[in-house]
């Protein structure tokens, strides 16, 4: 039997539908990282817009850039769905988007903040929310997102 090439979540193991892979062969690759924890402290609640940034059906949006599918938070983001560090979104996603980053992107202007205040931004801000796992079933546009906190735990456990 071969050696496993991925890392599972340190406490959830195979209950978590996400793994970490070591990145190799990064010549001529430009990375666009998001802060996993912290970042913009914008207010997020049910019905707020989110984007799933990935490659539906293997499509690329000009060059090697990902496609942005936009949907909405469909469950309370502070409450774990199914007793796991997940939440639901309502988004028209398709095959090829599993493992995609889910972010809250705001182009600027007056933005509601998590502390109840409103801040004005002259340019775009974003917050990494987690990783898209897939639709809850083929008949629904509801999809599962592994929260940023769980992703950070996974990545932090990789030695």
Image: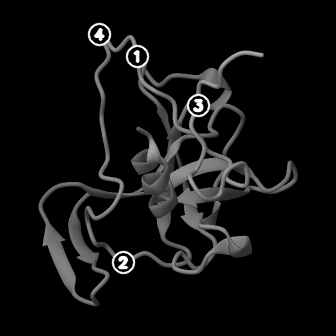
Q: Earlier in the sequence, mark 3 or mark 2?
A: 3
The answer to whether residue 58 is above or below residue 109 is above
The answer for how far apart the CA atoms under marks 3 and 1 are is 13 Å
Element type at mark 1: loop
Q: Which residue is mark 4?
A: 28
Residue at 22%, 88% (x, y): give it.
117
Q: Which mark is on residue 6?
A: 3
- Vertical position of residue 51 compared to residue 43: above or below: above
Residue 43 x, y percent position in the rendering: 36, 78
Task: Measure how far apart labels 3 and 2 are at the Cα level.
Answer: 34 Å
Farthest residue in the bottom direction? 116
Q: Nearer the viewer, residue 110 or 9?
A: 9
Residue 43 - label: 2
Percent x, y of residue 81:
68, 73
First-in-chain label (1 vs 2)? 1
* 94 sits left or right of 137 in the view: left
The CA span between labels 3 and 4 is 23 Å
Give the position of the C terminus as an image quadrant. top left
Q: Quadrant of residue 55?
A: top right
Q: CA distance from mark 1 to mark 2?
A: 36 Å
Asked if residue 106 can be seen in this view, the reply is no
Circle nearer the N terminus (2, 4): 4
Q: CA distance from mark 2 to mark 4?
A: 36 Å
Instruction: Describe the element under mark 4 as helix, strand or loop.
Output: loop
Residue occupying image coordinates x 62% and y 75%: 80
User: Which label lies toward us, 1 or 2?
Assistant: 1
Residue placed under numbered mark 1 in the picture: 24
Q: Are marks 2 and 4 in contact (CB under 8 Å)?
A: no
| Label 4: few (<14), some (14–19) or many (≥20) C-alpha neighbours in 10 Å | few
Mark 4 or 1: the one toward you: 1
Determine whether the residue tagged by mark 3 lies in a helix, strand or loop.
Answer: loop
- The tag earlier along the polypeptide, 3 or 1, is 3
């Amino acid at each position: 039997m071969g050696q496993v090439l991925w890392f599972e979540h340190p406490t959830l193991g195979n209950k978590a539908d996400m793994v970490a892979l070591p990145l190799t062969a990064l010549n001529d690759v430009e990375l666009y990282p998001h802060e996993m924890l912290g970042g913009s402290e914008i207010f997020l609640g049910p019905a707020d817009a989110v984007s799933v940034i990935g490659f539906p059906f293997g499509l690329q949006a000009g060059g090697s850039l990902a496609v942005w599918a936009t949907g909405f938070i469909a469950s309370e983001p502070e409450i774990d769905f199914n007793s796991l560090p997940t939440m639901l979104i309502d988004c028209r996603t398709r095959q090829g988007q599993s493992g995609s980053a889910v972010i809250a992107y705001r182009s600027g202007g007056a933005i509601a903040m998590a502390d109840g205040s409103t801040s004005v931004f002259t340019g775009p801000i974003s917050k990494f929310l987690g990783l898209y796992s897939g639709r809850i079933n083929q008949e629904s546009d509801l999809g599962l997102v592994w929260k940023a906190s769980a992703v950070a735990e996974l990545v932090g456990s990789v030695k």
